[in-house]
Image (cartoon, rainbow, N blue to C red):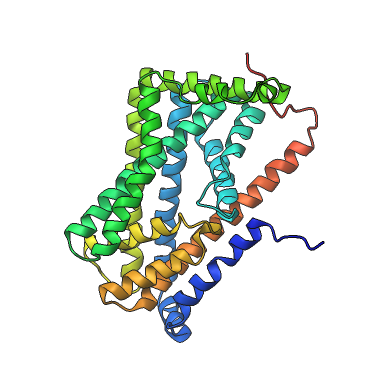
Amino acid sequence: MKKRAPLSWLLWLLPLPLLWLAFCNISFGRLADLFTSLNALQVAALVGVNVLVLATFSARWWIVLLAQGTARVSFVEVSAYRLVSFAVSFFTPGPQFGGEPLQVYFLNRSHDVPTGPALASVALEKTIELTINGLMMAAGAILVVRSELLPELGQTGVVLTLLLMVLPLGLLVLFWSGYRPFTPLIGLLPESIRQAAVFEQAAAAVLNAEDEIIAFCQQRRGALILASLVTIASWVLFVVEYGFALSLFGLRLPLGQVVALVVAARLAFLVPAPGGLGAVEASQVFVMQALGYDPAIGLSLSLLIRVRDLLFGLAGLALGWAMGAQHLLRPTDRYFVEEE
């Protein structure tokens, strides 16, 4: 009997037609000219901006952990865990998720944080990120519509981002109000599942995480607002990064056009392909053509993004391997810290 190809392998094939659309009308000689025009100082400056963007991601989670008060985790440690998580999410077929369980695991293993609070910190950090991302993408799409640059892209972006924002924003409102949204869902499961020992432990962790998130939203609103502001700052850096990268290729665009490129790229990352492969490249080429500029610059911009993310991803994999190897040398370590 012939085995079916796993869905993950099919998702790796999805980028191929998108990559063909991005590259089919672009001269490789033109791409080479654009990249050879860059000098070492310009590349170093661009890397510096990217490091700042990455630091804001870590800062958001660090703020949540500090406000929680469940463990003393340094900013360097948080950044390391976040980088490993990014690597897993980047190389996993899907819309930039997958590494979050590792963040819970690192807190659990290295800092003796019980699973509930660890899960709460990661879930809350991700919920804040998704909510603010949806808000900023919707604002950017509205700006694109109002400036009449790319009305179709802007209208699509507004609808998609508002839909994506509904769930995380709704969860934040429920937690802020003291409501436990997952408790009723657990009660709907069959009795045979709820009585399993493994499920009982998982359910206890989820319920404990809900209590932690509710307490955070109601008692640490300043930290919640600060984490949201850090996320907004990361979006400002996104736009700065794009504008600066475009200037390196000799193109200075108005703010509205830069925002259009950013919104298109962020929407492309939602495509269920590893790291948005193919979708990001095609989106940047499409937007540059629609704006009346050289599409090779759009492809060059997406390749810069791809090289940046690939380097960060490989660094995260190497760091994760080193941390895993260190753990294997200490087999007495616990994989899960029991709830008190």
Taking the image as shown, residue 305 lies to the left or right of residue 191, namely: left
Q: Nearer the viewer, residue 69 or 38?
A: 69
Residue 43 image position (x, y, % from top left): 43, 65
Return the residue found at the far right.
1
Up the image or down, 11 lies above or below 160; here it is below
Q: Residue at x 54, y 67 (%)?
A: 15
Residue 309 image position (x, y, % from top left): 51, 58
Q: Residue at x 77, y 60 (%)?
A: 3
Residue 277 image position (x, y, % from top left): 52, 63
Residue 294 image position (x, y, % from top left): 33, 79
Q: Residue at x 23, y 53 (%)?
A: 142
Up the image or down, 74 lies above or below 231; here it is above
Up the image or down, 233 lies above or below 200; here it is below
Taking the image as shown, residue 193 lies to the left or right of residue 119, namely: right
Up the image or down, 209 lies above or below 1; here it is above
Q: Nearer the viewer, residue 192 or 31?
A: 192
Q: Residue at x 36, y 61 (%)?
A: 264
